[in-house]
Amino acid sequence: MTVFNNERLLFTPASPEANAIPLVFAYPNTYSVGITSLGYQIVWETLAMRPDVRIRRLFTDIAEPLPREIEILGFSVSWELDYINILNCLKSLNVPIHSAERTLNHPLIFGGGSVLSANPEPFAPFFDVILLGDGENLLHDFIDAYKEIRGASKDEQLRHLAQIPGIYVPSLYEVTYDSPQGEIQSIEPVDNTIPATIQKQIYRGDRLSASTVVTENAIWENIYMVEVVRSCPEMCRFCLASYSTLPFRTASLEKSLIPAIERGLQVTRRIGLLGASVTQHPEFEALLDYFSQPKYDDVRLSIASVRTNTVTEKLAQVLVRRNTRSITIAVESGSEKVRQIVNKKLTNEEIIQAAINAKSGGLKAMKLYGMVGIPGEEQTDIEQTVQMMQAIKKAAPGLRLTLGCSTFVPKAQTPFQWFGVNPDAKKRLKFLQKHLKSQGIDFRPESYNWSAIQALISRGDRRLAPVLELIGDYGDSLGSYKRAFKQLRGQLPPLDFYVHEDWSTDRVLPWHHLQGALPQSTLLNHRDRAIAHLNPS
């Protein structure tokens, strides 16, 4: 009996037609991680509901029985550092890792997800096709277009697919550089039949996503997830989750949320409300009242992300009655200046009040998310974070406090894409560790070194592909990156070029030809407003 037998499906897959396309949809991580991804679930359901597709799933530790001949192989990529598993998967299936080396005897390789939609360039040589944006419409457009040229030459297939809005074919774009170690000079289509830019596709409906499968083998065991909002109205300037999914959309309470939740409650009593800012749904109070009904007394309710100044005593009470003991908020910093730089519209008083309300409502713990190395941050700002945590502890004694802290990583298609990683972030994490531990506050830092590698991939161009290949041979460790850059010295810029350098705003960015939710002029405006807080005079 496999983990697939433990799944409870909330949809009925179509019966494949005789000539259905044999397609494998992979998640480049373990089953327990991949099946917890709502994005992966939705793509799987969308394809499984088509009778013209015969879909099988593949994870790094398990797979459904795969067809002898795979016609299309897709990957959902939601974390930069999962790329190593993509290369390993291709090798295990005897598929050349480079698109240029594949023929019609090999599957067409496509990818999608938040990482590829923001900046697919480090992975460009590995994919035939990349889907940019929301899958609700784009997946159907992709399969429909593929059917029109199924059996044609690979060149004909790729050229045809490149005409579909949101479908990016990397091999049909040429990148030139000032020098092997220099900046990008231009990114142009190979000829005038190929679109010069590719527009990310945005789904604008009021029915958002919900789980299509519930299983005890997911990381969040037996959870049914409902997407309450998509994007975030706050628009913190470093946040890919906000900028990459604009505009802010909310699911209709009566038409979407309530029916979806009722479906989930038929198979599980654990519900997760997802979104970058769930409590900013305009009908969130009504949603709380819905869950307050006595018939849901045995339901365990989890909320992914809570806007700090929406943490009310009522919210805490509902969560406690629904078997939740803690709540998570993102504050970024204890410094008012730093919060203004990133566009975090919060005061310390609101943060402290959230803790007071959480405790008054019966919650036992609160986790805060912070960040170090934000552009313009100074040591005094770090000290203010310590002072803020001390003030919270004093105002809400007995509430167990945790500060999870990451290093600022510049993300493509956000206003902070031009800033590099601050090397001082490493010692600032250590400062927080020292001063919070002595106060009895749990401090959980993310690895500075791995944050630097994440930045490398986030800001990388196609010259990184040979580095990623070498990592696959050397082993996925921090030392392997330095070794790979040393071996390829002279063929690409140094590590600091991608990770630590601040980039000028007039340079050609690796994702110059990919149009996100906002034009670059708007991102620049947000960047300039952040810089204004560094020199308020």
Image (cartoon, grey):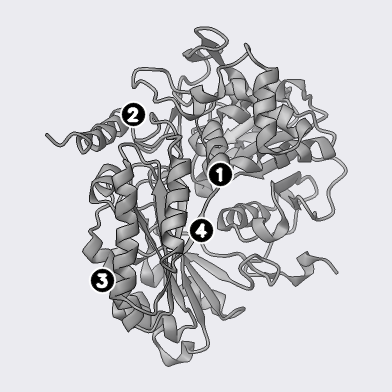
Q: Is residue 431 above or below residue 269?
A: above
Q: Earlier in the sequence, mark 4 or mark 1?
A: 1
What's the mark number on residue 520? 2
Instruction: Assess disc 2: are there few (<14), some (14-19) or many (≥20) residues with their C-alpha within 10 Å of its C-alpha.
Output: some
Left or right of 236 on screen, residue 109:
right
Expressed as whole percent of the image width and height from the top left, the position of residue 63 reads 80, 54
Q: Dot 4: what SS?
A: strand
Mark 2 vs mark 1, CA separation in Å: 21 Å
Which residue type carries mark 4?
A: Arg
In this rendering, does residue 157 appear at all? no
Q: Is residue 2 above or below residue 205?
A: below
Left or right of 469 on screen, residue 438:
left
Q: Dot 1: what SS?
A: loop
Q: Which residue is mark 3?
A: 353
Expressed as whole percent of the image width and height from the top left, the position of residue 57 reads 74, 53
Q: Answer whether labels 3 and 2 touch (C-beta < 8 Å).
A: no
Mark 4 vs mark 2, CA separation in Å: 35 Å
Instruction: Assess disc 4: are there few (<14), some (14-19) or many (≥20) residues with their C-alpha within 10 Å of its C-alpha.
Output: some
